[in-house]
Amino acid sequence: MARSPLPTVPTPLIDVEVTHSSRRGVPVAAVITRPVGDGARETRDSAGAFGELVTHLHATGEAGEVHTVAAGTPARWLVGAGSGDAAAYRSAGAAFVRAADADASAAAKAGARPARTVQVRLPDGAGPREYAEFAVGALLGGYRFRVTGEDPEPRVRAVRLLTDGRADAACADAVERATRLAAASALARDLANTPSNVKNPEWLAGVARRAAKDVPNLSVEVRDEQWLENKGFGGVLAVGGGSASPPRLIELSYRPRGARTHLLLVGKGITFDTGGISIKPAEGMHLMRTDMAGGGAVIAAIRAIAALGLNVRVTALVPSAENHVSGSAYRPGDVVRHYGGRTTEVGNTDAEGRMVLADALAYGIKQYSPDTIVDMATLTGAMKLSLGLRTGGLFATEDELADRVRTAGESAGEAWWRMPLLEDLAEAVRGGLADVKQTPQGPGGITAALFLREFTEGLPWAHLDIAGPARSETNYNEVVPGGTGFGARTLVELAASYE
């Protein structure tokens, strides 16, 4: 039987180990930093041990700068970590792993033995934070998802982060936590990158089941189309009605003993989006395999939250459907009844994300009575125009919740910008033919958020629009082309803030 070319999901990541014991014969990378301040030109490395190399190579220490050095020298690579902030260390880790992978591939092609294990010396004074950020960069910068029948090129399998022995335990703990966070981003990337001839709602539900297996206190229920019909999930059924692959609602529940706060996460799980009858232009439609990036981030986040044993109850809902064109597809002008009874007048079948999220929000609130709600979705092209491709849009009904999300994003290395919920547009969302209008006039990102707010029952709620940063066409920092996993680490850090 032919081997499937589809990569394993979750993608195996490299091993990252913290140790004070250097291994002879294993190549070493030296991380150097560049002090900030007027006229600052000198670089700082590990106790000056590589100073001659720094001078010889004219290394600046800029974040992500990598110099490969000839064999026989104290270090095989010099890696810049800029001014030493968190983003610079993530960039350094990512750039280093890419360079080491390139060296391994070149060595194999030349008939030499590639280095599968490498060692890294961080600058004197580097502590748990720096080790953790470098680890995140190394874990995610070397991520690769490629559907191929060819044998994979040799790559680095393990990174040994060397210490001086004084803070081994603290650094090791920080790196272990960082590995959980990176694994969340990587799983979210896997889910977004998987092609849609494989990834349908049932496949996504199956991966959620496997991902939750053997994780303490984490359980999964998958609701099929008959259950959705019986419960009145009109939005999910309408969006999924044009596809041969029926919709699903994926419910994940993490219930640690003693948790005092209950957080509800809702993620858009559209496994492919043609736009439906309001069909999208052909150019760029292939990227719609990533239209479930919000749902993927939610699945990955709750898995990491449970694996870390955070003391907060979390329920995650991912309404999943394919938005296709057929004789059974929903139409502009239809009126759809959501879970709980509220009705929506459909204006554009390509605004499908808010339709499935509305059902899940209403259901999650009635079924679970959470304290706080956060939804995440690749919802509007308007947000890409507003904030570009590296910043997520943040809408929130409470300042305290908005601050928590932004702070969580800063800890995770993911940028969020708060957008307004303009009350003068709220009336435009309310309908005449139905209770609400799906696509009212006005700025698209804001009116979409106001539409969703109609289903939140006045509870503390944040809407995270990741249409821009959910996918990338280039390498930057720890991001690689394809699905980025954006938002997964933010959700983990947000949950941690409630402990």
Image (cartoon, rainbow, N blue to C red):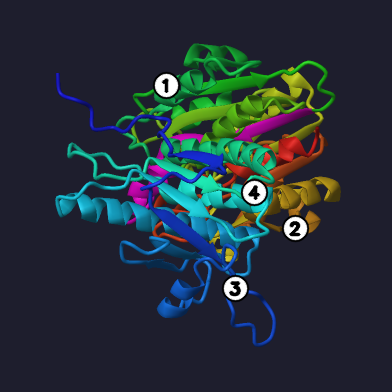
Q: Nearer the viewer, mark 3 or mark 2?
A: 3
Tell me the quarter of the picture where residue 48 sits. Answer: bottom right
| Residue to which mark 3 is pinned | 34
Q: Are marks 2 and 1 in contact (CB under 8 Å)?
A: no
Neighbourhood count class around disc 1 (C-alpha, 10 Å): few under 14, some 14–19, many 20 upward:
many
Instruction: Tell me which numbered mark, 2 or 4, is placed earlier along the sequence.
Output: 4
Side of 16 where 434 appears, left or right: right
What are the residue bounds of the magenta stretch? 262-290
Q: Amino acid at mark 1?
A: Glu
| Residue to which mark 2 is pinned | 420
Disc 2 element: loop
Instruction: Tell me which numbered mark, 3 or 4, is placed earlier along the sequence.
Output: 3
Q: Nearer the viewer, mark 2 or mark 1?
A: 1
Report the quarter where the C terminus lies.
top right
Q: Amino acid at mark 2?
A: Pro
| Residue to which mark 4 is pinned | 412
In the image, 304 versus 202, the foreground residue is 304
Q: Amino acid at mark 3?
A: Arg
Instruction: Tell me which numbered mark, 3 or 1, is placed earlier along the sequence.
Output: 3
The CA distance from mark 3 to mark 4 is 23 Å
Tell me the quarter of the picture where residue 232 sits. Answer: top right
Q: Is residue 432 visible?
A: no
| Residue to which mark 1 is pinned | 202
Instruction: Tell me which numbered mark, 2 or 1, is placed earlier along the sequence.
Output: 1
In the image, 430 versus 432, the foreground residue is 430
- 21 versus 214 height, above or below: below
Disc 4 element: helix
**Is residue 371 inside the magenta stretch?**
no
Disc 1 element: helix
Residue 351 x/y as whole percent: 52, 44
